[in-house]
Amino acid sequence: MAAAMAKFNAMPDTPGTGPYPAIKEIARNLPGNTVYRPANLAAIQPGTLGVVGWGNGGCSPDGASQRLHLAELASHGYVVVAAGQILSGPGIEARPPGEQGERTSEKDVMAGIEWALAENQREGSPLHGLIDPNKVAVSGFSCGGVQALSLARDPRIKAIVVHNTGLFPSGAPMMAGMTSDKAWLKALHTPVLYIQGGKTDIAYENGMDDFKRIDHVPAAILNQDTGHGGNFMDENGGPAATAAVNWLEWQLRGDAEAAAMFKGPNCGYCTDSHWTYERKKLD
């Protein structure tokens, strides 16, 4: 695992495959979070950028720990704000997880969303007027996925994508400082996508149980045989990032091609042998 992390840490940042090559940065007025956004904001039409709040794996304070995935999202026209600072990646001496500092909370994820919406209104901000406040999503990996689900009740959230995660049943052991409640699922008010790593994913059972319990909003679950680590160390975030982009493009922008990956008798993920796909209330 240490060798894999060292290799990942040495990988260069990538701009993503979307039409707007992305960068990551720390905003001066948001020093505790990491921002991924299109590099050339002059190419963005007013009121078109979406916003994605991101919770890191392990609720880590490293906002660069899923950097390839987040840059891929941003390259499709999103301001993605991860909890935590840049503690890994090119030119950064990576610290072991236990030496990175305090874990983040769902408040840190929400702070990123609030910041982006405020920047959209702030005169002089590079993002002024570029964001559509009706295109807001929340997402996250593992513990960060639990953070995302805890925030999903916010009426401003219009889409949810969570990775390799699931809420813990009452009384189950959890990470120190972590909270989880299956009752949160009843507060969901918008479509939700789970992207899991198959039966070897330690979050598989919790995620499948969440999906089984959700019966009042559209829901989908994708599984691939990656285990808990997913595709976060793969170039441009791999197939999981592509699936997340498709979900966001459908849910936030109404893209018909992206929708066809999830709905209809011959949907893209219905026939893709890489994935096992289940859905509710989508057709």
Image (spheres, rainbow, N blue to C red):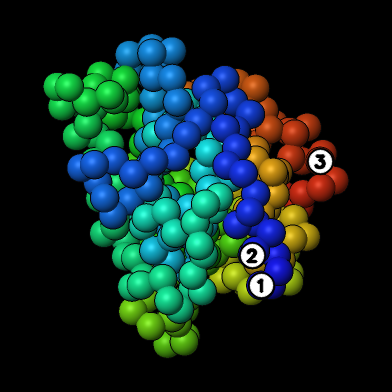
Numbered disc 1: secondary structure: helix
Can you identify the residue that label 2 sits on? 5
Secondary element at image label 2: helix
Relative to 239, is 62 above or below?
below
From the viewer's perspective, is 115 left or right of 252?
Answer: left
- The residue at which mark 3 appears reads as 272
Mark 3 and mark 1: Cα distance apart in space? 33 Å
Q: Residues within 10 Å of mark 1 (few under 14, many from 20)?
A: few
Residue lying at 39% horizontally and 41% vertically, measured from the top left: 25
As measured in the structure, the alpha-carbon distance from the residue carrying label 2 to the one carrying label 3 is 30 Å
CB atoms of marks 1 and 2 within 8 Å: yes
Q: Is residue 101 visible?
A: yes
In the rendered view, tell whether residue 82 sits above or below residue 176.
above
| Residue 96 position in % (x across, y down) | 51, 74
Q: In the picture, which quadrant includes the N terminus?
A: bottom right
Identify the residue at horizontal 47%, vertical 87% (top origin): 173
Q: Residues within 10 Å of mark 2 (few under 14, many from 20)?
A: some
